[in-house]
Amino acid sequence: MKQVLDEVRGQLGGLIGKIWEEPGNRLCVLADKKSVVPVVRSLIEKLGMRFVFLFATDERKILGAFLIHYVFLRQAEGVFVTVKTEVRENDPVFPSVTPYVPQANWQEREIQDLFGLVAGGHPDPRRLVFHEDWPGSLHPLRKDFALPENLPRTGREYVFDRVEGDGVFEIPVGPVHAGIIEPGHFRFSSAGESILKLEIRHFYKHKGIEKLGEGKSPEDLILLAERVSGDNSLSHATACAQALESLSGLEIPPRARFIRVVLLELERLYNHVSDISGIALDVGFGFGAGQLTRIKEYLMRLNERVTGSRFLRSAVVPGGVRKDLSVSGKIFLADETKKIKKDFDEVIQIFWNVNSLVDRIRSTGVIKREVAEALAGVGPVARASGIDRDLRRDLSYAAYGNLLFMVPVFTEGDVESRMRVRIQEVHESFKLIHEALELMPEGAFRTDQKPLMPGRNALGCVESPRGECFHWIMTDGEGKITRWKIHSPSFVNWPLIEHAVLENIVPDFPLINKSMNLSYSGNDR
Amino acid sequence: MFRILRKNIRVGRVTIPVPETGKPEEKSLGIPEIEAGKCTGCGKCAEICPVTALPLSDKSAEDRRELLLCRGACVACGLCGPACPHDAIVFKNGDAAKLKKELADSFSFKLSEAMRDPSFVIPSKRTASKNEPLSGGSPGGVGPGEVLPDDFERKLAEKIRKIFARSLHIREVDTGSCNACESEIAGLSNPVYDAERFGIHFVASPRHADMLLVTGPVSRQMELALLKTYQAVPSPKLVVACGSCAISGGVFGGSYAVLGGVDRVIPVDVYVPGCPPSPEAILKGIFLALDK
């Protein structure tokens, strides 16, 4: 921490204002609006930090300005560095960092829609979260926002980027898709079969969850967090609980940490098995799809036996977990996972002998390492493109620091690599569950709740089955939740698909989409 | 090839006979029910309920107060159970599909009947029209704990043939759900539930569909898409609202970007409570819609 502080001060001395430490290994730096771009660039280029996400808060009541927070992670020390800059209401333009940090693209456009601030110099300042029929003067995350009784629809049309030329045509897909999946719009420009350009337009499912969370009690907030992305319920709930715990100064008991690991890995298991079965289904490999959906069903029933919910909902509470694992429960869980692992292995061994499967997935939908790095891909998608990044190992939350596991990394970046990453992670998850069950200490499984401390903020992070998931929570002067930022892995990974499909044929799109398995709900929030 | 065969033989048949309603996993959290004898009307559960599924009838006199439980809003979070100082709330299984009217009127909860917003008790347009209960089954579907009769499959197939000529084609529409409902609906096609054996198919286009299965609260930006999809379905058509969000808006009610339940936009025939409803419950909801 000290070392990072010295480095930051030494490198940026003249550019920054106040610099201070915050609980949870976080360093905060205040920078002037004009010097934000050079500060952001030198943190990345000179100090080797990784840009994670950015968001805004409305602090006009206290500071008389909006604050924009740029969050960086220094991997080696596990230290977060947050650069904060003030933006006044009468001068709502903030400098866009997108030209230097491409991954900020959507995040800055989100701030434009939700806060009514303007990203000056943004290469693509179109609407993102709100569609064209949302009145331009309404910005719901401003504190003085009031929902008018009759919200008018303004009736403008979104303009897609066009590709023109002989034989180029457009294929619109969505928002209601052919399969049982979530809504979103895809606009392909193609010549013949191959895709020249894909533009995605999402946020059909925008539900204003971040706003709904304001003023909620910790229990209710976790309930909402579980519904950010249904199949990643537990990851979101755990990230949210971590932030709430650090806001009320709670230290969760060691036993709860191990139980959380078991549950988080159970979630990863059923998600990964489901994704692999989806890939098998999309290439028409009925045996694989059928067998793996059966195994997924068994895993979900196991979830229900352990926590009472097939989606592991209501399992995590601030201060620990809701239910303890009994001795017989532990034995049952160990036995069942052993059986399911054997079952899974038998099915997967057959996979690699099926030529029609391997033909379709090899060298399909390649995401090059450079693309994944520039757009800061996360999770299995990034690990399939050669980026070695996993918060379980890098920040070792819950009890991951006490456990031994591998982080599989593949370098091809195609559908096959993404599938192989998931298969290996399934194996690691089985191992982790057994390890955690064995090393689980006796003792309490939850601590009593304490009220949230006023005027604080905290960050929770979890490596969900889809990748890094962050929850940032701020309290006001009375200890009430006044801002809740959800940074979901899908929000980061969606833009990658526009690159993954290039020069592939249109019929391979569902396969590529499935191999990335992105949540529309987590993205739209 | 032989390995596939061997594995298939080794796994054997996994499909559950007919939806085993009322017999879900024994450890499931389930849906809360209030035991009339133990409840004193203190209201501790109503205070903690995050979706106001437990409204109080009268807040002044504690001993004369009635507690209402609204299944359509309940997300089965389990917060009310431990909050009750008298252990009067038990969690039971059986998230059976009910008409919205039934959800409001004939809920098994003894203390009182459940009620919610005004729209909750307005019967949908279709409810009044043709109403022919499944012969052999109890009217309005199968209650929790009941096992479906043996000839259920045959009768269901007959019913489908009568209404839709051959089989039931369903178009699933997500209008803003968290994707848990999608996961469960997709699960209907797995070998364990295998909805295809009842002649139930999920189709790609609303123009091929007889029924819309809608999940999620209707978000503002999905309203038009839902309406257009509904219009594209040829008549006669059925609509099933799946999950607490689709019934009342669920945990997302009151947001600037959410309109509320599905029936704010299109008429609904059957409501399936749960967050998310189990695959069995969704199947039952589909069967119930055919009963009308």
Image: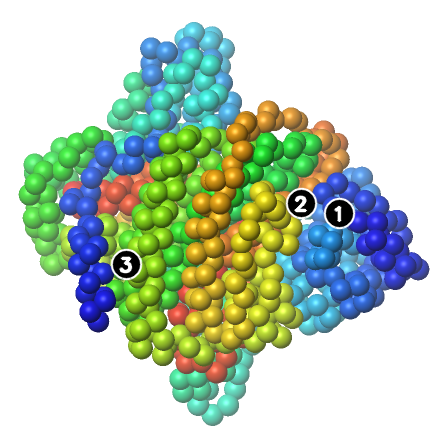
Looking at the rendered structure, the kind of residue marked 3 is Gln
Q: CA distance from mark 3 to mark 1?
A: 46 Å
Looking at the rendered structure, the kind of residue marked 2 is Leu
Callout 1 and callout 2 share a chain: yes
Decide: few, some or many residues near mark 2? Use Cα within 10 Å; few <14, some 14-19, many ≥20: many
Residue positioned 35% across, 26% down in the render: B91
x and y, in percent, of residue A225 in the image? 53, 43
Looking at the rendered structure, the kind of residue marked 1 is Arg
- Drawn side of residue B191 relative to residue A400, left or right: left
Decide: few, some or many residues near mark 1? Use Cα within 10 Å; few <14, some 14-19, many ≥20: some
Please give the chain letter of the residue carrying mark 1: A
**Is label 2 in a helix, a strand or a loop?**
strand
Q: Say whether disc 3 or disc 1 marks the residue closer to the N-terminus.
A: 1
Q: Are marks 1 and 2 in contact (CB under 8 Å)?
A: yes
Q: CA distance from mark 3 to mark 2?
A: 39 Å
* Residue A37 visible in the picture: no
Q: Which residue is mark 2?
A: A459
Q: Say whether disc 1 or disc 2 marks the residue closer to the N-terminus.
A: 1
Q: Which residue is mark 3?
A: A291
Residue positioned 35% across, 30% down in the render: B31
